[in-house]
Image: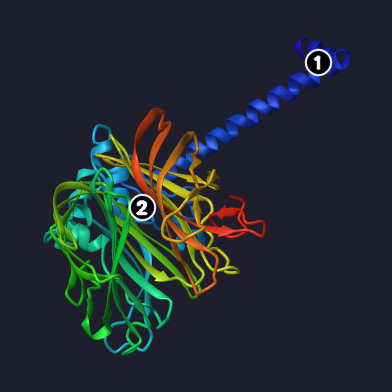
Amino acid sequence: MLWILAFRHLVVRKRRAAFLLLGFALGVGVMIVLLSVGEAMVAQSRDAELVGGGEVTVLPQGIDLEAMRTGGVGGQFFGIERARFVVRQLVGGPRQADVVRAVSPAIEGKMLYLRHRGAAVPVPVRAGAEVPSRARASGAGLDVVAGRWEDTPGDSAWIAPTTQQLYDELDRFHRPLRPDSTWGEWHYFNVVSGPEEWWYLTWLVGGRVGEPGRWGGQLLVTHRRPDGRYERFTANVPDAQVAFDTARADLTLGPNTVRQRDGVYRLHADARGAEGGRVRLDLAVTPLPRRYFPPVELREDAFLSGYVVPALAARATGTLCAGARCSRVRDAPAYHDHNWGVWRDVTWEWGQGRGTALSLLYGGVYGPAGVEGTTAAPFFIALVDSLGMRQVLRFRTIRYEGARPAKGVPGVVAPERFTLVAVREADSVRLDVRVSEALASRTGAAGFERAFVQMRGRFAIGGRVAGTAVADTGSGFFETYVTPDSAGQATFGRRNSSH
């Protein structure tokens, strides 16, 4: 009887029957998919070759999990860039201390080639590595049958370096891959010694490093006096009197030196001005804890641009003398970064500020025209506080407005104000800067119209980061390039850019 009723229903109510059958089929299909996914997850959780351990595995966005497991092309060179910074600050830092119990970095199944004694051909092997104490803390420790499995000094330095180890890792000098006349590498510091007084300090190495007589060093000091005038001092040093260290920040340019010990930078300088004046300084610059930005490099063929900020916010104590006038500073606001690379036809946008709670850094490099991958758009802005890195966001343009005279080069103007808006997924911040002072310098050969502009100004920043409102105000230093167009109007930023 039931079969007769069902058959008659199908014949009489064809559309309704078809609709019910379709719904039933979809339900069965969804159930099959869910069961398959669940089975795959259980299988992967039991797979010894899958990178894991602990409660959560952190992977870069977009990584192919199956390629990692099977060793495919997508997983062969898998790694997390700046992994030390990620472990120490972004995942395992004090900001996450209430939710993260332990962080265990691991290298799993990497391809290596082993050549043992007497073998003509290297043997491909797979190798892995962990930090024993962190692996145990995350519940992924090894059951050691014999011997000991303990942290080495290298493990300890990777996870929790001493202050000296941290700044040696961050801040060191480099040797160019090949001699290049446009190679330059320098320490840059700025120090605010009073409400209307500040200093730009640069210890620079440049030229065809390694070729006798074709490279050297230079000390550059720019002093903004309380009366608004600028003084510039320089000292040129031949290569025989230059010494730099590829394992730490130490640099010697004749009598002018930078030394870093236990995170404190000792600066000494003695230079002459263009009009015969003299500048002498002895400073101790101490970075504030966790306020740094890790090393990054842009590289494309012969183009290279490297950058690190060991001291996004710092305190300077010591003596600064210009001519017969000397001043003693104590805990003066300071900043330090380190740049290296080739700089032919390279320009940039850059700024750093220090507010009540936040320190900020933004920037990006425009590489030589015609070289792919060297225009840094979108740019980045990093927000840092006492707990370390809070967020890194991206932006594409800086909106410059107005024009005000810049000191240093007659006829050159700087913007009166500028704005940028940066985003990262649901996060968004807006930075507004009002320029209070600008100094211009000519760049390139004589007659070249572009000028480099260093600015001092006040900023306000606001938005939301990780679901929390952020707002701060403060002051900072900012840099851009200015080029007059055919109508005599100033274009800020990259020549022929949309800024």
Q: Residue 489, percent across and down?
A: 61, 53
The answer to whether residue 439 is left or right of residue 263 is right
Taking depth in this image into account, of 332 and 60 the one nearest to the observer is: 332
Q: Which mark is residue 16?
A: 1
Expressed as whole percent of the image width and height from the top left, the position of residue 144 reads 16, 56
Residue 294, percent across and down?
Answer: 32, 55
92 vs 345: above or below = above
The residue that disc 2 covers is: 48
Q: Residue at x 55, y 33 (%)?
A: 34
Q: Name the outermost residue toward the right.
A: 12
Q: Residue at x 28, y 45 (%)?
A: 196
In three-dimensional space, the C-alpha distance between marks 1 and 2, rounded to whole angstroms, equals: 51 Å
Residue 303 in the image: above or below residue 360: below
Q: Please name whichever residue, 33 or 441, is drawn nearer the observer in this view of the structure.
A: 441
- Rendering coords of residue 122 (x, y %): 37, 81
* Amino acid bearing label 2: Ala
Q: Quadrant of residue 189?
A: bottom left
Nearer to the camera, 320 or 51: 320
Q: Is residue 251 above or below residue 324?
A: below
Does residue 410 appear in the picture of this structure?
yes
Q: Quadrant of residue 89?
A: top left
Q: Secondary structure at mark 2?
A: loop
Callout 2 environment at 10 Å: few (<14), some (14 to 19), or many (20+)?
A: few
Q: Quadrant of the N terminus?
A: top right
Quadrant of the image occupied by residue 448: bottom right
On the picture, is 21 further left or further right than 49? Answer: right
Q: Would residue 104 be visible to someone looking at this image?
A: no
Q: Earlier in the sequence, mark 1 or mark 2?
A: 1
Q: Which mark is residue 231?
A: none
Amino acid type, mark 1: Arg
